[in-house]
Image: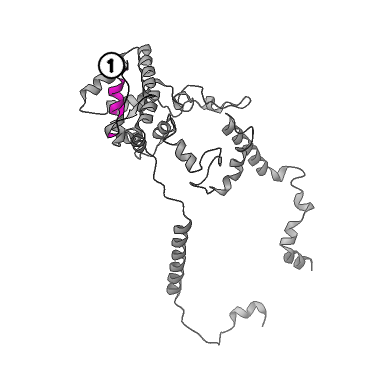
Amino acid sequence: MKADDERYREWKGGYRSYDLVKEASIALGIVLAIAVVLTILFSSPDEKSSTVQSWARSDPVDFVTTATRELDGSSASGRYGPPYNHASGSVQHAWFLHPQRWLGVSHPVNNPEDFVLAPLRAITGQPGLQSAVGTYESASANQQTAWTSAYEKGLMKAKVAAGNSISVPAGKYGPLPAMMTSLLSFAQGGGLDGALLASRQFYQTDYTKPLLFMADSAGGVALANRAMAEHLLGTQWGMMNETGSYPGQVWLWLYTFWYQVKPFQGHNADLLVLLVMGALSLALVLIPFIPGVRDIPQWIPVHRIIWRDHYRASTG
């Protein structure tokens, strides 16, 4: 009988029962137990989220200082530029490429309105507060600047008072003390987090505004200090990493590598890294068409070593 016909020969040996469902259940249980143990030992730490509420409670002076800078447009995000506003503070470019400027403001953020004035208007039952907001909005631009400048100087000497409120030396601040006291209380109660997430989307998953607000933290309390403690700063790992001292996605190593060398540490780092990785990715795609590179397998026949049994059989 030929070897190919062995499968048709009648089996005359013994038989024993085999419970496939039982074996599958045991295997599934073992794999599940191993997965649970490995998850407990090696999973990512469940860090508590940073929120505007926790920031306002932990450092009310920094929160109010940042809110005042949002009001006068001097914060980092207020001077950032596209895609949030029309400023030019952080617009990246390389040679003739100006992608931020070309794409324009796709996600508009009005810092004074979105971070301060609109949330204050949403607070009900406080006619004094609404009067203060009206006074500020009806004042001239020069008067508003005079109030915010004076208040920012006063905040440099501010102290935390009872109930996590703040105490600022007397000065010509106009309606700002009443506005910022209410905004601080609103934030400490968690209301500002919800107000900044409000959008027309069914699912409230756009965290752009609260993240920008916290990133503007005057003292770096809201995000920068925590990022440093968790080794998340660009100067520590680069573009992305896991919380703590663990590296992040392995496939991102080539991206993060460029951030560690010059000139990719400057103002235009993100765009330069994008261009380099784009060129490398294009070169990878075009390998079959690049003379010399496409001939490397012929010079170094690694495939013949790997598939040596196949080639021996075909030539024998």
Q: Nearer the viewer, residue 70 or 249?
A: 70
Where residue 113 appears, x then y in whole percent?
Answer: 35, 24
Vertically, is 282 above or below 40?
Answer: above
From the top left corner, tell me how far across and down residue 301 is, in percent: 76, 56
> So how many labels did they put on this image?
1
Taking the image as shown, residue 137 lies to the left or right of residue 288, namely left
For residue 285, which quarter of the picture? top right
Front residue of 146 and 197? 146
Percent position (x, y) of residue 212?
A: 43, 32
Residue ID for mark 1:
135
Q: Is residue 135 left or right of residue 16?
A: left
- Is residue 131 visible to the viewer in this orientation of the structure? yes
Tell me, yes or no, whether the highlighted magenta stretch contains residue 169: yes
Give amino acid for label 1: Thr
Residue 39 magenta-drawn? no
Q: Position of residue 12 (x, y in %)?
A: 55, 87
Q: Residue at x 58, y 41 (%)?
A: 256
Would you call the spot at circle 1 few (<14 residues within 10 Å), some (14-19), or many (20 or more)? some
Magenta range is 163-182
Relative placement, left or right, of 174 versus 315 is: left
**Which residue: 36% across, 34% down?**
59
